[in-house]
Image (spheres, grey):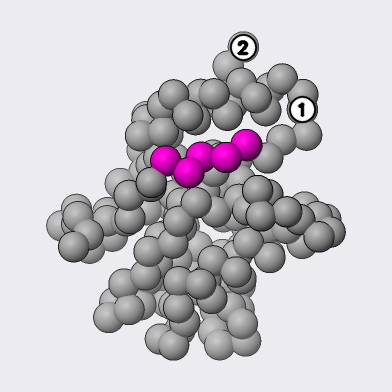
Amino acid sequence: SVPNGGDGRAGGSASSGIYGPASSSGGSSGKDRTRLLQAQPQQTRHARRLYIGHLPPDLSEDDVHAFFRESIHAAMNKVNPSPEDDPILSVYINVERRFAFLEFKTMEICTATLALDGINILGKGKVKVKRPNDYNPAMAPTPNPA
C-alpha cells in the first residue's frame, strides 16, 4: 500500500537505493551532486518528484517511464543514451484516480520536466505535469551551493 497525505497525492513508491550518476555537463560538480544525492536521498526526494495528472486509463508504469525518459532525452539532444542515462528513478501509477508520480535522479531534471505540462502522451491525451501537493520550495536544497 502507498502512503497517502490525505488527498491521495502525497504517496509514491520508495526508492530502492539505485541512485546512479547524476546527469551533468560539468566535471566535479556532477560528482558532488551525486555524492549529495547519495548522502541525502530522502532530503531531496520531495524536490525530485512530479505529479502527472489526467493520465489516460490504459497506460502502464513502463509506458509512462519510457515516454518521459524519451521526451527528456530528446530535449537534451541525447542520441543512443545508455541505461545509466535514465533520468527517472521510479514511476508510481494510481490507475483508479488516473495520476502518477515520477521520481527523478536530479532536482534539475525534475524542474526542467515541468515544461512538459500539457503534453499529449502517446497520442492518448494531454496530461498535467506539476509539483506534488507536498512540495515545499523552502525545504528544497539549493542545487549549486556557493
Q: Position of residue 105 (x, y in %)?
A: 54, 43
Left or right of 57, for residue 24 = right
Left or right of 68, for residue 89 = left
Q: Amino acid at mark 2?
A: Ala
**Tag on residue 146?**
2
**Tag on residue 26?**
1
Quarter the C terminus occupies = top right
Q: Is residue 82 above or below residue 117?
A: above
Q: Nearer the viewer, mark 2 or mark 1?
A: 1
Q: Is residue 146 above or below residue 117?
A: above
Residue 7 appears in the picture as rendered: no
Identify the mark nearer the N-term, 2 or 1: 1
Quarter the N terminus occupies = bottom left
Q: For residue 80: magenta?
A: no
Q: Give the extent of the magenta segment.
A: 17-22
Q: Amino acid at mark 1?
A: Gly
- The residue shown at (58%, 16%) is 145
- The residue shown at (44%, 88%) is 58
Q: Position of residue 89 (x, y in %)?
A: 50, 51
Asked where in the image residue 30 lies, by quadrant, the reply is: top right
Q: Is residue 135 above or below residue 132?
A: above
| Front position in the image: 142 or 66 | 66
- The residue shown at (73%, 54%) is 82
